[in-house]
């Protein structure tokens, strides 16, 4: 017999990808819903571009950053509900009886989420190009967007895995999903932070890490290479990832009671 | 300790928070190549025992060695020695049968070159070759159970744990699974630990049976030996007229010890054995009690359970009666 951690990760990643592909709803919804929201917002808030200091004259280009984060939030829910299903149906027990290593389970699960995250990012970028958005950071910037999509998919996917391992309930994760959306709405998703007129809202948006994730993507689309925005965006994404993966790993140990 | 195909359990206990002891100090010994039937009603402690023996649940106290390894200290070695099909066939409805085997062979560290042939061999053996590329969500209960068994056998385990493997299956699927389990034990020397609620299953398959109730093993032995302990057959009768129940009970009581209460029929353990039946029929005729049903039953594992616990086991008596109907 032979085997490696990489073979285990690949086998579990393959399963995660296959399972996602065979449930079209889990692909289509994260693609369509953010686009609908983008259309509604850019139609209703286009006049914002006339505010003095607004960084672009295209609200569509400004708002295109938001679907990337919404997609990552869907990653949280998908990764979480899939793992919760495994717990509820006893599939995790089946895996526990094999020589599977815990790290392979989390990494395999996240690999599937990353693939979905990259598909989503590709779709949003193509839609952006089709509606005439000019990516200020060019082809390399688009590559950076794919990289960022992968990082936030891992970070939010690990958060979903943590919630699943902690609660063992798909319903609980779906219940938490709207709460995650609150973070999105309390960010700079619709207005640059320095143009937010309400003090408390500007304070919350500044304290909200989601603002920096959005601004990282936004900088690549509308302003070009902005070191501060990239450092803050990638920095928060990695930080969320480290915290989520740590929490998921600890919770997995508690969930896998095997001796 | 060297590898064996045995299971040895001493004073095994599992307590849950705010609950009673699910398993309360059981002792067990299962020999290599033996099929051991673990029989008991729902909630008796069967599945908890299996979870402990398969390393998925740490015992509160006591010890267990499976395949020569301690279930607490040598969890990975135990898992490498055993195959298990737990109570629910935990399968991913979005994957095909072949996908499941591909995943299982990889996670069980089967050499890459051997994975495909081993999967095909197992699919063939459990009769799923044609359905191998269909999603499991469309499988019947029997097909899921057979796939579950194939997955448990991927790494050629020396011991096999089957937790209620035929619950909910139709008779044909059930007997097909029995044939395969018996073959594994007889031809490949696999030790099988099988929990079941079905008396017939334990009777047909098991070399030895342990009966568990409220976390305690209340009887253990070969099915024949356990039934021989009870010894005498019982007669079960149902009157045509409901008003005759008391008179029927009175007549039957002359011929043996009454059995249970609350059942639809009235039953006594025949003091004289089968030879006492003609006298029973004559007495009922003389008392003018007309019967809708009369049946004589050889001692069953349910009788063993009844004798040891004072209660009847769910799903009792299948295939163990010789009915005489209608009578008197």
Image (cartoon, coloured by chain):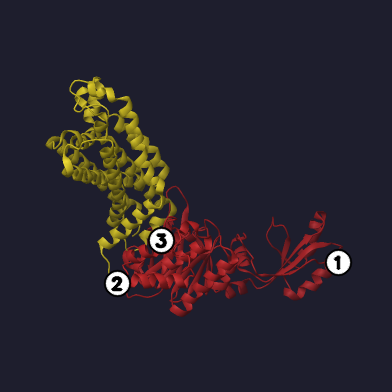
- Chain shown red: that is B
Lower sequence index among marks 3 and 1: 3
The image shows residue A200, relative to residue B69, as above or below, that is above
Q: Position of residue B105 (x, y in %)?
A: 35, 66
Q: How many other residues sit within 10 Å of disc 3, few (<14), some (14-19) or many (≥20)?
A: many
**Local secondary structure at mark 1:** helix
Same-subunit check for callouts 1 and 2? no
Q: Chain of mark 3?
A: B
Same-subunit check for callouts 3 and 1? yes
Cα separation, mark 3 vs mark 2, equals 26 Å
- Chain shown yellow: that is A
In the picture as drawn, the residue positioned furthest to the bottom comes out as B187
Q: Position of residue B266 (x, y in %)?
A: 74, 61
Which residue has dot 3 on it?
B52
Q: Residue at x 35, y 29 (%)?
A: A40
Residue sitting nearer the eye, B282 or B77: B77
Q: Residue at x 63, y 69 (%)?
A: B300
Tag 3–tag 2 contact (CB < 8 Å): no
Cα separation, mark 1 vs mark 2, equals 73 Å
Q: Chain of mark 1?
A: B
Residue sitting nearer the eye, B38 or B84: B84
Q: Which label belongs to residue B285?
A: 1
Is residue B156 visible to us here? Answer: no
The image shows residue B209, relative to residue A151, as above or below, that is below
Q: Residue at x 62, y 74 (%)?
A: B228
Which residue has dot 2 on it?
A1
Q: Position of residue B277 (x, y in %)?
A: 77, 72
Judge depth for marks 1 and 2 and give the one in front: 2
Query: B303 left or right of B154?
Result: right
Which image quarter is the N terminus of chain B in?
Answer: bottom left
């Amino acid at each position: 017999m032979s085997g490696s951690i990489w073979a285990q990760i690949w086998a579990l990643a393959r399963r995660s990808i296959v399972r996602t592909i065979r449930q079209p709803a889990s692909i289509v919804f994260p693609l369509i819903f953010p686009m609908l929201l983008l259309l509604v917002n850019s139609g209703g808030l286009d006049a914002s571009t006339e505010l003095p200091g607004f960084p672009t004259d295209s609200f569509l280009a400004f708002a295109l950053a938001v679907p990337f984060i919404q997609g990552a939030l869907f990653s949280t829910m998908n990764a979480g509900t899939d793992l919760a299903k495994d717990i509820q149906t006893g599939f995790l027990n089946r895996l526990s009886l094999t020589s599977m290593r815990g790290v392979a389970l989390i990494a395999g699960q996240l690999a599937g989420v990353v693939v979905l995250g990259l598909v989503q990012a590709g779709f949003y970028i193509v839609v952006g190009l089709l509606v005439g958005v000019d990516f200020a950071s060019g082809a390399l910037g688009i590559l950076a967007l794919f990289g960022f999509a992968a990082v936030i998919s891992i970070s939010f996917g690990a958060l979903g895995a943590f919630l699943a391992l902690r609660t063992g309930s798909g319903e609980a994760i779906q219940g938490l999903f709207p709460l995650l959306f609150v973070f999105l709405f309390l960010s700079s998703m619709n207005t640059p932070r320095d143009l937010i007129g309400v003090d408390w809202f500007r304070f919350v948006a500044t304290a909200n890490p989601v603002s920096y994730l959005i601004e990282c993507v936004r900088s690549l689309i509308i302003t070009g290479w902005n070191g501060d925005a990239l450092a803050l965006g990638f920095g928060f994404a990695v930080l969320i990832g480290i915290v989520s993966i740590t929490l998921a790993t600890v919770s997995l140990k508690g969930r896998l009671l095997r001796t | 300790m060297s590898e064996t195909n045995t299971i040895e359990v001493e004073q095994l206990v599992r307590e849950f928070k705010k609950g009673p002891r699910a398993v309360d100090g059981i002792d067990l010994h299962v020999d290599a190549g033996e099929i051991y039937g673990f029989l008991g009603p729902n909630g008796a402690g069967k599945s908890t025992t299996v979870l402990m023996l398969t390393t998925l649940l740490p015992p509160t106290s006591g010890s267990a060695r499976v395949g020569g390894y301690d279930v607490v200290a040598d969890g990975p070695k135990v898992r490498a020695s055993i195959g298990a099909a737990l109570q629910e066939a935990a399968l991913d409805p979005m994957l095909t049968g072949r996908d499941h085997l591909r995943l299982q062979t990889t996670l069980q560290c089967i050499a890459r070159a051997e994975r495909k042939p081993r999967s095909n061999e197992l699919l063939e053996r459990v009769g799923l070759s044609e359905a191998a590329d269909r999603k499991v969500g469309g499988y019947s209960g029997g097909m899921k159970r057979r796939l579950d068994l194939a997955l448990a056998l991927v790494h050629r385990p020396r011991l096999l744990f089957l937790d209620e493997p035929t619950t909910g299956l139709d008779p044909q699927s059930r007997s097909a699974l029995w044939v395969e389990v018996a073959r594994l034990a007889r031809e490949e020397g696999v030790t099988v630990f099988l929990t079941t609620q079905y008396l017939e299953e334990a009777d047909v398959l098991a070399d030895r049976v342990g009966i568990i109730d409220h976390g305690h093993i209340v009887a253990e032995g070969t099915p024949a030996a356990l039934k021989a302990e009870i010894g005498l057959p019982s007669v079960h009768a149902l009157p045509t007229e409901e008003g005759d129940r008391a008179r029927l009970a009175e007549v039957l009581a002359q011929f043996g010890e009454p059995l249970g209460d609350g059942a639809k029929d009235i039953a006594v353990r025949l003091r004289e054995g089968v030879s006492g039946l003609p006298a029973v029929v004559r007495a009922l005729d003389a008392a003018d009690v007309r019967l809708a049903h009369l049946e004589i039953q050889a001692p069953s594992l349910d009788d063993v359970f009844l004798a040891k616990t004072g209660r009847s086991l769910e799903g009792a008596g299948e295939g163990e009666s010789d009915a005489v109907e209608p009578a008197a």
